[in-house]
Image: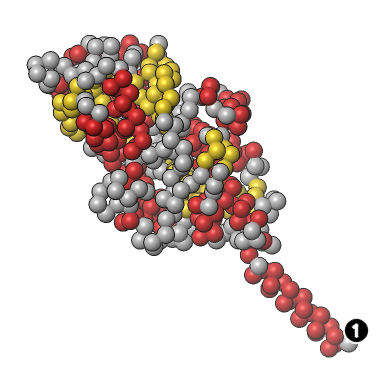
Amino acid sequence: MSKRLFSIATLIVVIAMVLSACAGGATGGGTLKVVSSLPMTGASLTQTQTIVNAIKLRLDQAQSKACGGKYTIAYEAWDDASAALGKWDPAVETENGNKAAADKSIVAYIGTFNSGAAKLSIPILNAAGPLVMVSPANTYPGLTKPGKGEADEPNKYYPSGVRNYSRVVTADDVQGSVDARFMQSLGAKTVYILDDQELYGKGVADVFEKTAKEIGMTVVGHEGIDPKAQNYQALMTKISTSNNGGAPDGIFVGMVVDNNAAQLLKDKVAVMGDNTKVKYMGPDGIQTQAFIDGAGKDVSEGAYASVAGLPFDKLNDAGKKFLADYEAKYGKLTEPYAIYGYESANAVLKAIEDVCAAGGNPTDRKAVRDAVFAIKDFAGVLGTWSFDANGDTTLTDMTVWQVQNGSYVAVGTFK
């Protein structure tokens, strides 16, 4: 071969290599990083550990590979809580958001668990690509729905003008309404409302109050509690005479278990007797074994809590397979949010695969974000669902649970 022909051949090879490198995800490869940001310290750990377990289960089933094996999925479970607070910490969640924004290998952020935490990280990640978030647990409506929160919500969370936040769980504008109607069905005509003064707790309590008034219940009072109080005996004594000298028919608490939920119930029962006399109900923030264990088996007996979705015995075939696979690997599942962790991972993996199938580059954050929001009629473990334009799931099932003999038992499912 002449030197001239050799030079031409060499040039062709070099050009081919450059074109191949520039082709992106369709011909590329490497590692795609997915992180979760959840409170792995404090009382919420009984719930969040099962979410992390479920994410790992889904990735294990995919052998941590995507796009025909071209890409490896690396997963890291980040803690957004601190020992100092014993629950999610605004400073830690903000740090997690900034860390994810700066690490260009991260293509999806599964979280958060607390709606107040999402409020901090959404705008950080929105300006970083945007980097898509898929939450397995946030339920505050104002994060996504115009007219369902404060006047400047949700637009203030999306400085780029493009939505990057989605959730596979039904929001509180559904949950709070179902809870009020359920309490009325128990015969409650009067109710006292408490909340922990956090975004999630107050949000669901406000929806409960609005619905209660619309359906003819009398709201005797509504106030925020101090989550760090040593006890709530004075508060419960006041409530015990708040209804024309007597107790209301029910008490609704908008709160998470971390915010002294068990102590609040202990003092309610100490002052007003067991939960058959004055009905006691909360949202998914107290639907955890940690709440029952903290209050005690006898004290918690008869309390109600609602959670989005279906009870285990009503899951579809995919959901039942998830349950069997989870319990085979991690033991009996009693917490409600594991399946949402699994479905969040499902959504992320589907988006990555869809990007590759279209010849795109799954290392491109915007491409993955677009693919998440394009998910429609997905046959998942929760049922067949879609993300709407706001990033909300189209599923609206809610299940009410009651503490019976030391465990939560499903007592009704509602739309």
Q: Which type of secondary structure does the marked residue at label 1 adopt?
A: loop
- Examine the rendered structure and indicate whether residue 356 appears above or below residue 349: below
Q: Nearer the viewer, residue 57 or 376?
A: 376
The residue lying at 72 percent from left, 72 percent from top is 17
**Does any portion of residue 390 appear in the rendered image?**
yes
Three-letter code for the amino acid on which mark 1 is drawn = Met
Residue 129 is situated, as x and y percent measured from the top left of the image, at 46, 61
Q: Residues within 10 Å of mark 1 (few under 14, many from 20)?
A: few
Figure quadrant of residue 130? bottom left
Residue 249 is situated, as x and y percent measured from the top left of the image, at 21, 17
- Count of number-bearing discs: 1
The residue lying at 46 percent from left, 27 percent from top is 335
Q: Nearer the viewer, residue 406 or 95?
A: 406
As drawn, which residue projects farthest toward the left?
A: 245
- Examine the rendered structure and indicate whether residue 220 appears above or below residue 123: above
- Residue indicated by mark 1: 1
The residue lying at 44 percent from left, 38 percent from top is 169
- Examine the rendered structure and indicate whether residue 49 appears above or below residue 147: above
Left or right of residue 64, residue 204 in this image = left
Left or right of residue 73, residue 282 in this image = left
Residue 56 is situated, as x and y percent measured from the top left of the image, at 56, 38
